[in-house]
Image (tube, rainbow, N blue to C red):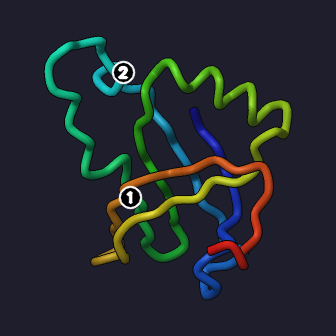
């Protein structure tokens, strides 16, 4: 899935464009097991910011991508929040991502 959007936060990057690529990963689909739960991944993707180029590449369970695509197409989801570490040498590990219908900066 390839998306393109505008950054709203942090303020100094507000209004700049971000290319987003989300890949479906079969290994993230939870398996029904009686043993221990699967390990939580330490990152879901990486944001790269170098000059005028800004991009995010990440992965989600492959069976969630059709649902997310339908929500985006019907405008039921319009915002994506990425949460992770501060950038270091142009890269930042992203530990979670959330899709929202509305965005209010006062909530964060």
Q: Total marks drawn? A: 2
Instruction: From the viewer's perspective, tell me whether residue 18 is left or right of residue 88.
Output: right
User: Would you name the residue on which mark 2 appears?
Assistant: 29
71 or 21, which is in the foreground? Answer: 71
The tag on residue 44 is: none
Q: Secondary structure at mark 2?
A: loop
| Nearest to N terminus: mark 1 or mark 2 | 2
Q: Residue furthest right?
A: 74
Question: How crowded is the residue under tag 1: few (<14 C-alpha within 10 Å), some, or many (20+)?
Answer: many
Instruction: From the viewer's perspective, tell me whether residue 55 is left or right of residue 38.
Output: right
Q: Secondary structure at mark 1?
A: strand
The relative height of residue 51 versus residue 36 in the rendered view (above or below) is: below
User: Would you name the residue on which mark 1 appears?
Assistant: 94
Quarter the C terminus occupies: bottom right
- x and y, in percent, of residue 78 in the image: 76, 49
Q: Residue furthest bottom?
A: 12
Residue at figure coordinates x 43%, y 27% from the top left: 61
Foreground mark, 1 or 2, reads 2
The relative height of residue 103 versus residue 90 in the rendered view (above or below) is: above
- x and y, in percent, of residue 68 in the image: 65, 31
Residue at figure coordinates x 76%, y 70% from the top left: 104
Residue at figure coordinates x 57%, y 32% from the top left: 1
Q: Are marks 1 and 2 in contact (CB under 8 Å)?
A: no
Instruction: From the viewer's perspective, tell me whether residue 82 is left or right of residue 48.
Output: right
Q: Residue furthest front?
A: 34
Question: How crowded is the residue under tag 2: few (<14 C-alpha within 10 Å), some, or many (20+)?
Answer: some
Separation (CA) of disc 1 from disc 2: 19 Å
Residue 35, located in which quarter of the rendered image? top left
Residue at figure coordinates x 75%, y 32% from the top left: 71
């Amino acid at each position: 899935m390839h998306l393109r959007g505008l950054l709203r936060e942090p303020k100094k990057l507000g209004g700049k464009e971000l290319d987003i690529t989300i890949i479906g990963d079969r290994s993230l689909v939870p398996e029904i097991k009686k043993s221990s739960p699967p390990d939580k991944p330490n990152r879901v993707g990486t944001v790269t910011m170098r000059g005028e180029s800004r991009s995010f590449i990440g992965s989600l369970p492959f069976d969630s991508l059709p649902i997310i695509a339908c929500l985006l197409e019907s405008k039921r989801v319009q915002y994506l929040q990425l949460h992770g570490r501060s950038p270091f040498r142009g890269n930042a590990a992203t530990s979670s991502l959330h899709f929202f219908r509305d965005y209010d900066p006062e909530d964060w």
